[in-house]
Image: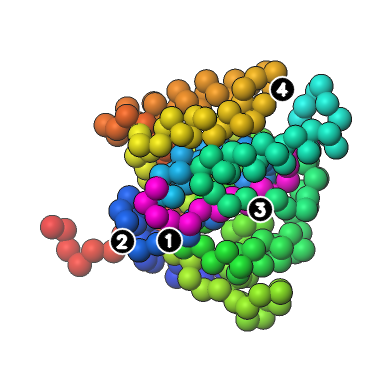
Amino acid sequence: MFSSIRQFISMGFLAAACGLSASAQQRTILAIGAHAADMDLTAGAILAHQKKLGDRVVILHMTLGEAGNPNMPPAQYAEQKRREAIASGEALGAEVIIGPYADAMLPNDEEARKYVADIIRQVKPTYVITHWKNSFHKDHRNTHAIVVDAVLMAELEAVKTAHPPYRGLKGVFYADNWEDSEDFKPYIFVDVSDVFDQWKQAIRSYQMVRGGVSPFDYFDYYTAHLKEEGALVGKKYAVSLDVDESSKRRILDSLR
Ligand SMILES: [Zn+2]
């Protein structure tokens, strides 16, 4: 049943996806990441861009990503990450929701799917952005699996949560995350040149981006990557997204 519903979502997807570059009516974009900072880094510039166009943008962090600081106990770092996530969200113009799960312990189960389905029913997104299916991080893989099922569960009368079913979602995009790069193919490029400086400031809300937490240089990688993606498509800065293979299907009456 899910695959047929997914195909249904896919049918109008390409035309709908063009809406990401033009402002006709207000859309709601819900970005769902495994750890606080994942979506800020990979989709934050798109969120800031869409906000500027008049859209509502929301980030759900499934966990705070509090386990990754070698210099601070997780409980203490969690409070810091919570403040950083809120500050980054404010700088992007995004509402921030923080899930109830623990870093490295995100369960790939029905309860997590119902949690996300209920968030989708409350937020009523036009588009969802989340992790690509392949990742070397377990929480990222689980977030992908949870979200793609939750998108469909949110539509179903049979799935009971605190809020009624929601059927307005037009498509799911996958973010370009250095940890999720296996088989990720940039498919849609969004010109984010107008918000690049704003996004750079926002992600620096996180200590892990400013430096001193991880040996990976998030700031250099993502700022250079947006420049590289922009150069590929003739823009100053761009963010790429992938979609499901079935969403790449185009049906024409004839070649024109
Ligand atoms: Zn992460």
The residue located at (70%, 50%) in the rendering is 98
> Dot 1 corresponds to which residue?
27
Question: Looking at the rendering, in which quadrant would you find the N terminus?
Answer: bottom right
> Dot 4 corresponds to which residue?
213
Rounded to the nearest whole Å, what is the CA distance between mark 1 and mark 2?
Answer: 9 Å
What percent of the width, then of the height, locates residue 223?
47, 26
What percent of the width, then of the height, locates residue 14?
35, 58
What percent of the width, then of the height, locates residue 154?
61, 70
**Numbered disc in front, either 3 or 4:** 3
The residue located at (35%, 37%) in the rendering is 194
> Dot 3 corresponds to which residue?
97
Q: Nearer the viewer, residue 253 or 42?
A: 42
User: Label 4 amino acid?
Assistant: Val
Q: Do tag 4 and tag 2 residues touch (Cβ < 8 Å)? A: no
The residue located at (45%, 70%) in the rendering is 8
Point out the tag, 3 or 4, that comes first from the N-terminus.
3
Q: Which residues are magenta?
A: 52-67
User: Label 1 amino acid?
Assistant: Arg
- The answer to whether residue 172 is left or right of residue 231 is right
Rounded to the nearest whole Å, what is the CA distance between mark 1 and mark 4?
Answer: 35 Å
The residue located at (60%, 69%) in the rendering is 121
Residue 162 drawn above or below residue 58: below
- The answer to whether residue 229 is left or right of residue 206 is left
Q: Do tag 1 and tag 2 residues touch (Cβ < 8 Å)? A: no
The image quadrant that residue 70 belongs to is top right
Rounded to the nearest whole Å, what is the CA distance between mark 1 and mark 3?
Answer: 18 Å
User: Label 3 amino acid?
Assistant: Ile
What percent of the width, then of the height, locates residue 162?
71, 74
> Dot 2 corresponds to which residue?
24
Point out the tag, 1 or 3, that comes first from the N-terminus.
1
User: Label 2 amino acid?
Assistant: Ala
